[in-house]
Image: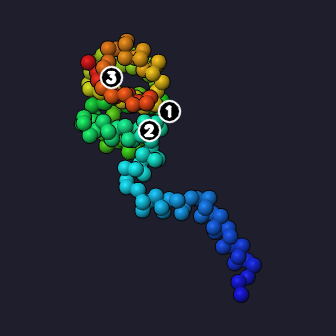
Amino acid sequence: MISKKKIINIFFLFVILFHLNLFQNFYDIFSKNYDERMIINYGNYDKQGYGFIKQINSNYKLNKNFIYYNYDMAEPHWLTEFKPKYIYNLKDFNNLSFDQIKKYKYIVIIDEPFDKVDSLIKENNYKIILKENNSYFLSIL
């Protein structure tokens, strides 16, 4: 016969497993591929913009040639292979010299309202290559 203590331990084990979302995590690992899981965790056009950057990288080689700005000020660990220059505030563009900006070909802006990006584009004469939701891929002219 199962003792009361074992029943309580089993109950708490299941509570912990549900709290950690273990069953859903196992299902996701076996039912979704790597890119789908990364988009769920790191966002498509929001959060850290994993899907957006993946889409851009398929057409343009983003290796050490772009500036990355995220409205949420995230510095994603998965982006280190591309070695971007991180900007933490759109006003920081004004602090960079023309020569510093010209080292890069592109700017990737994740989850920023258009009114703030529009003024940056007009002031610096950048060209919008791709715009999805509130994420932008700009070319430095």
Residue 48 has which mark?
Answer: 2
Residue farthest toward the right in the current orientation of the protein: 4
Question: Residue 128's x, y, as percent?
Answer: 32, 22
Q: Is 100 positioned to the left or the right of 73 in the image?
A: left
Secondary structure beneath label 2? loop
Residue at image position (47%, 47%) is 41
Bin the neighbour count of mark 2 within 10 Å (Cα to Cα): few under 14, some 14-19, many 20 and up: many
How many numbered marks are there? 3
Query: The C terminus is located in which quarter?
Result: top left
Question: Residue 54's x, y, as percent?
Answer: 33, 41
Q: Is 118 positioned to the left or the right of 1 in the image?
A: left
Q: Is 44 positioned to the left or the right of 129 in the image?
A: right
Q: Is there CB contact under 8 Å for labels 3 and 2? A: no
Residue at image position (58%, 59%) is 20
Residue 128 has which mark?
Answer: 3
Relative to 7, residue 41 above or below: above
Amino acid on which the number 1 mark rests in the picture: Asp
Q: Is 101 positioned to the left or the right of 27 in the image?
A: left
Give the mark, 3 or 1, whose residue is nearer the N terminus: 1
Mark 3 vs mark 2: give the one in front: 3
Q: How far is the residue under mark 3 from the one under mark 1?
A: 21 Å
Amino acid on which the number 2 mark rests in the picture: Gln
Amino acid on which the number 3 mark rests in the picture: Ile
Q: Is there CB contact under 8 Å for labels 2 and 1? A: yes
Relative to 41, residue 93 above or below: above
Q: Which residue is mark 1?
A: 72
Q: How far is the residue under mark 2 from the one under mark 1?
A: 8 Å
Relative to 23, residue 8 above or below: below
Residue at image position (35%, 38%) is 53
Secondary structure beneath label 3? strand
Q: Quadrant of residue 133?
A: top left
- Residue 140 appears in the rendering: yes
